[in-house]
Amino acid sequence: MSAVEHLGVVLEKIAIAERDAKRQAGGVRLVAVSKTFEAAAIRPVIEAGQRVFGENRVQEAQGKWPDMKAEFPDIELHLIGPLQSNKAREAVSLFDVIETIDREKIAAELAKEIARQGRSPRLYVQVNTGSEAQKAGIEPRDAVAFVKRCRETHGLAIEGLMCIPPAEENPGPHFALLAKLAKEAGVDKLSMGMSGDYELAVAFGATSVRVGSAIFGTR
Ligand SMILES: *Cc1c(COP(=O)(O)O)cnc(C)c1O
C-alpha cells in the first residue's frame, strides 16, 4: 500500500475511534510525522489533502519544508522533537506549532524570538509522563507550575500538553495523566498517540495524534 492509501486507513480509524468514544466527528487532528522522509515521499500525501505535518529536527525540516510551505501555504508544521536553545530562532521562523517546550531556558529563548520576529507559533509543553531519565519533557509534578511560569514570566500562550509514553508500558495511564495535568494547568489541547496507540489516545481525549510509520512506512 502507498502512503496515500495508509493515510486513508489512519483517517478512517481516527473517525471510528472518535465515534466509539462519542466524540465529535473530525475533532482530532492528524499530525503526519514525516521525519527522515524526503520531500518526494511527502508530496503525494500533501496532494491527497493532508496539511498537518510533524518533524523532530529543526535542521532536517529547514532542508525540506520551506519550498513546500511556499507552494502550499496552508500547511501547518509541528516541531515534535527536542529543541536546543540555539535553534529557537530557526524554530520560530519555520514551525507553526512547537510541541516540545520543557524547560525555562527554552521558554525564555522562544519568548525572545517571538518578540523579535513578530511571529507566534502555537505552543505546547512536553511532559515526561514516565519520568524516564533519557527522555525530554518536564516532570509531571512540575508541569502545572511550569505552564504557569511560561505564561506569567515569559508571556507565552501555552495551549496544550504533549507526551511520549514509555515504549514498553501500557500508554493508557500516561494519556490519562496528561489529560489530568492539562485540566489542572487550564489548557485544552492534548498531543498524544503515535502509530501503535493513536486510537487509544483518541479514547483518552487526544486533540491531535502524531502518526509516522503507519503512514510513511518504517524508518
Ligand atoms: C517519530 C515520532 C512520532 C511518530 O512515531 P510513529 O511510531 O512512527 O508513528 C510521534 N511523536 C514523536 C515525538 C516522534 O518523534
Image: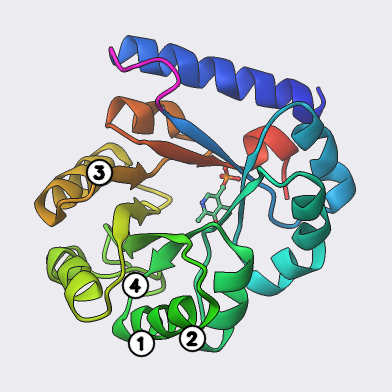
Q: CA distance from mark 2 to mark 1?
A: 7 Å
Chain-order first, disc 2 or disc 3: 2
- Secondary structure beneath disc 4? loop
Sequence-wise, the earlier of marks 4 and 3 is 4
Residue assigned mark 1: 105
What is the three-letter code of the residue carrying label 4? Asp
Which contiguous range is marked in magenta?
Answer: 22-27
Q: Secondary structure at mark 2?
A: helix
In the picture of the structure, the residue carrying the numbered disc 2 is: 85
Q: Residue at x 22, y 41 (%)?
A: 173
Magenta: main secondary structure equals loop
Q: Amino acid at mark 1?
A: Lys
Query: What's the residue at 55%, 57% (across, down)?
Result: 96
Q: Are marks 2 and 1 in contact (CB under 8 Å)?
A: yes
Which mark is first along the chain, 3 or 1? 1
Quarter holding the N terminus is top right
